[in-house]
Amino acid sequence: MLYRNRALDRAFRFIEESNFDIFCLQEVPGEFLERLRKLPYFIAFRVDKERLVRKSTSPHFVVILSRHPIIAQGEIPFPDYWSIIPLRARIFTFLMRPLYFARARNRGGLYVDVLPVGGIPLRIFNLHLMLAQPAWRLEEFERAMLQHDPTQPTIVCGDFNILEAPHITPLNWIFGGHATDVLFYTRERTVIERHFTEH
């Protein structure tokens, strides 16, 4: 959704008019969540993250909308890395505040089991992995996969924040990664796809 989205009416119309079975959304503002809850669909949500801006918090949500009944749901809390990120990352976050960078807390993912008509339960994951370094994103993905049942059909959706372009991968180093996370910028995609295949 992008938490500073200025086209919320257009986004809502797009969702409302789509012939969907499942919608997975990240960075949903609170006021938009309230609109989604009024739609005639099953819904599950949890805090995606709370952005700490000066002395106030701004929560955003991960949301799953389903045309089919949601028969179970669970949350996946992610670690708070702020205490271990390097000084360069703290300085970068402070300097980039005008571009909406901020410390985040209470981050997490969501999963639900939906029951299609005449089908067997399907598990849907909705993840928003950290914009930091590859090792932490992989840790969060594996934390979510602890809730994966190999005997159950599963779909994993979300924003994985995999950085794979030379002009943006320096963020991997800024947030505590290694120089090789910058130089070998296609490696993270290869690793995460291998883990998907294994699961």
Image: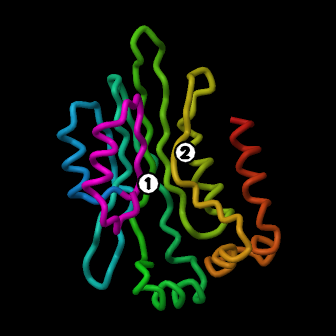
Left or right? Give the position of 169 relative to 115. right
Q: Answer with mark 1 or mark 2, whichever residue precedes in sequence.
A: 1
Colouring method of the image: rainbow
In the image, residue 195 above or below residue 123? below
Q: Secondary structure at mark 1?
A: strand
Relative to 28, residue 199 above or below: above
Q: Dot 2, crowdedness within 10 Å: few (<14), some or many (≥20)?
A: many
Type of the residue with mark 2? Ala
Percent coordinates x, y for residue 69 in the rendering: 32, 23
SS under mark 2? helix
In magenta stretch: residue 16: yes
Q: Amino acid at mark 1?
A: Gly
Residue, x 49% and y 29% (percent of image)? 123
Q: Residues within 10 Å of mark 1 (few under 14, many from 20)?
A: many
Looking at the image, which is closer to me, 20 or 189? 20
Q: Which residues are magenta?
A: 1-27
| Residue displayed at 50% across by 61% down | 79
Q: Which residue is mark 1?
A: 108
Task: Using the rendered view, name the quadrant where residue 135 is placed.
Answer: bottom right
